[in-house]
Image (cartoon, rainbow, N blue to C red):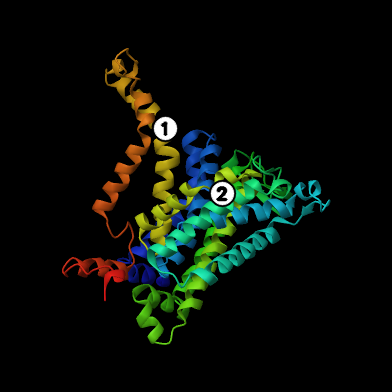
Amino acid sequence: MTRLRDFMRANLRNPNAIAYTLMLLGALSFPALVQFATGNNGDYLVGLAADGGIYMLMAIGLNVVVGFAGLLDLGYAAFFAIGSYTYAIVASNHMAATPLGHSLHVPFWIALFIAMVVAATAGALLGAPTLRLRGDYLAIVTLGFGEIVPRVFRNAGVWTGGVPGISALDVPTLPGWFQGPWVGQDFVWVPDFRFTSANLTAYYVLMVVLIAFVVFLVHNLYNSRLGRAWMAVREDETAAAASGVNTVTIKLLAFSIGAATSGFAGAFYGAKLSYVSSENFGFIVSVTVLAMVVLGGMGNIPGAMLGAIVLYFILFWLLPNAPQQVEALATSTGLDWLNHANPNGWPGIAEEVSRSKYVIFGMILVGIMLLRPQGLVPSQVRKQELKHAGHEPVAAPRQFQA
């Protein structure tokens, strides 16, 4: 008890500790709160939260690349696709339809790490010849990679399932599982448990465990010698090289670790959806994850996690439900005439909001960045940089300096 009190006193004004604590409490209580609030009909929301965890994993990984090492990656979804397809190939009957003629059913836990290693290898292969580039040039190269990979999967014929993709993937299994009131049942031990869409709480719990595992690894890397080297490269690559830092190796490690995390998330995505298609890994995924990192606070792990929560909530719950909510609000306030279309081109308030959802999304992003340019939970280094930048003359971009 004394240790807990000392810990609380020591971290009372630490934004990262507060953010971690709130997110942990929220993650642990979310399924029970949702089931209580919806009368045991909250499986959909719990499953939605598990899907949001996929974006959180990717945001943590991209934060290593963009926030820690300062490398702008616009093709991050490519590694997500590589992880998903790797899982689909090694954990389904798909390979039986190929010239190989034999299906592969690697257990989920092993396939998870195979997908991670394959994605990390792809990151190293892309990074080795390109990470000598800087800034805009690196961004263009990664953008091209992000566009090429889904098209390769789409056109690789029988090996990747072509346009339809690969379906009927194996689901995760465990030796046993506790069922309880969070799924409307009594406490019971279920042997040989298989994850199914009928028990989305299991996917949610698995995602929370995976996120905790990745946060632990990345947090330790950030506080290691490697993490300090990443920050040195981010602040001034030339000075870091002059100080003896092997900048190419350091950047390559950041790129590979970020890719591995994305592949990790991709394997979970394939297992939960039991289906992969190249249409799910477009440029918009890379931009969304990058926006999560910037919005939450570049270079800060809880910041990236919080940014993922906020943007996922806006994109996948607030905006899809906004038309119905606005329509109900108009009815309840006596403005029912707004709900009806008229010959003058007015489509009704719900349809108008539906058409304008990306405008609303953009306005929300602009508003947040105007109010919190350093991010929702910025790193202390980033916060000091922005603070001092406000009192110094604006320097010319590095590429235009002599």
Q: CA distance from mark 2 to mark 1?
A: 22 Å
For image coordinates 51% across by 64% down, the residue present is 258
Residue with the mark numbered 2 = 204
Which element type, helix, strand or loop, lies under badge 1? helix
The crowd level at tag 2 (other Cα within 10 Å; few <14, some 14-19, many 20+) is many
Q: What percent of the width, then of the height, locates residue 273?
A: 62, 44
Mark 1 or mark 2, which is nearer the start of the sequence?
Answer: 2
Name the amino acid type tagged 2.
Answer: Tyr
Pointer 1 residue: 321
Q: Quadrant of the C terminus?
A: bottom left
Give the tally of numbered discs.
Answer: 2
The x and y percentages for residue 157 are: 70, 46
The residue closer to the viewer here, 266 or 309, is 266
Question: Relative to 390, is 291 above or below?
Answer: above
Residue at 30% x, 71% y is: 398
* Residue drawn where x is 54% and y is 68% of the image: 256
Which numbered marker is on residue 369?
none
- Residue 201 x/y as whole percent: 58, 45
- For label 1, count other residues whose C-alpha is less than 10 Å away and answer few (under 14), some (14-19) or many (20+): some
Q: Considering depth in this image, is 328 or 260 the residue closer to the camera?
A: 260
Amino acid at pointer 1: Asn
Question: Can the viewer see residue 217 in this picture?
Answer: no
